[in-house]
């Protein structure tokens, strides 16, 4: 299976990078790389992530990296990363 990233998820990564880099650019680089790597590893065991509690849909799951939620949808031939959220953020429709 391939992993695709939505424009929303990429935008979330960019904003996260800007926020962290304002304090520590080195840490920002590591966090973003680790989130991206964790998102791409989903293809190995896509159902390992938990079902997103707010949505309760079997095909929409999440994994965690640091204090970030990587929310993705399992499709027939690929996994699609929908959004990246800080754990303090509430999931809203605009995020997916």
Image: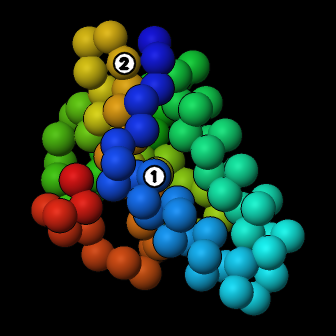
Q: Residues within 10 Å of mark 2 (few under 14, many from 20)?
A: some
Quarter of the figure with the N terminus: top left
> Which residue in the protein does label 2 denote?
78
Q: Residue furthest bottom?
A: 23
- The CA span between labels 2 and 1 is 17 Å
The x, y position of residue 30, in whole percent, is: 79, 59
N-term mark: 2 or 1: 1
Q: Are marks 2 and 1 in contact (CB under 8 Å)?
A: no
Q: Is residue 67 left or right of residue 22?
A: left
The vertical placement of 72 against 66, above or below, is above
Residue 10: mark = 1
Judging depth in this view, the residue of 31 and 58 nearest the camera is: 31
Q: Is residue 81 visible?
A: yes
Q: Looking at the image, can residue 50 be seen?
A: no
Q: Nearer the viewer, residue 19 or 63?
A: 19
How crowded pointer 1 is (Cα within 10 Å; few <14, some 14-19, many 20+) is rated as some
Residue drawn 26% across the image and 12% down it:
76
Instruction: Name the quadrant containing residue 59.
Output: top left
> Mark 2: which secondary structure?
strand
Viewer-closest of 46 and 26:
26
The residue located at (43%, 81%) in the rendering is 88
Q: Residue at x 55, y 71 (%)?
A: 16
């Amino acid at each position: 299976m391939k992993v695709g990233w939505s424009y929303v998820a990429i935008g979330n990564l960019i904003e996260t990078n800007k926020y962290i880099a304002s304090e520590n650019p080195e840490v920002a680089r590591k966090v973003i790389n680790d989130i991206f790597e964790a998102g791409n590893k989903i293809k190995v065991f896509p159902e390992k992530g938990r079902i997103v509690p707010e949505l309760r849909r079997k095909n929409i799951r999440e994994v965690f990296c640091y204090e970030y939620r990587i929310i993705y949808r399992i499709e027939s031939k690929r996994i699609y990363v929908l959004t990246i959220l800080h754990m303090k953020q509430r999931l809203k429709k605009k995020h997916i």
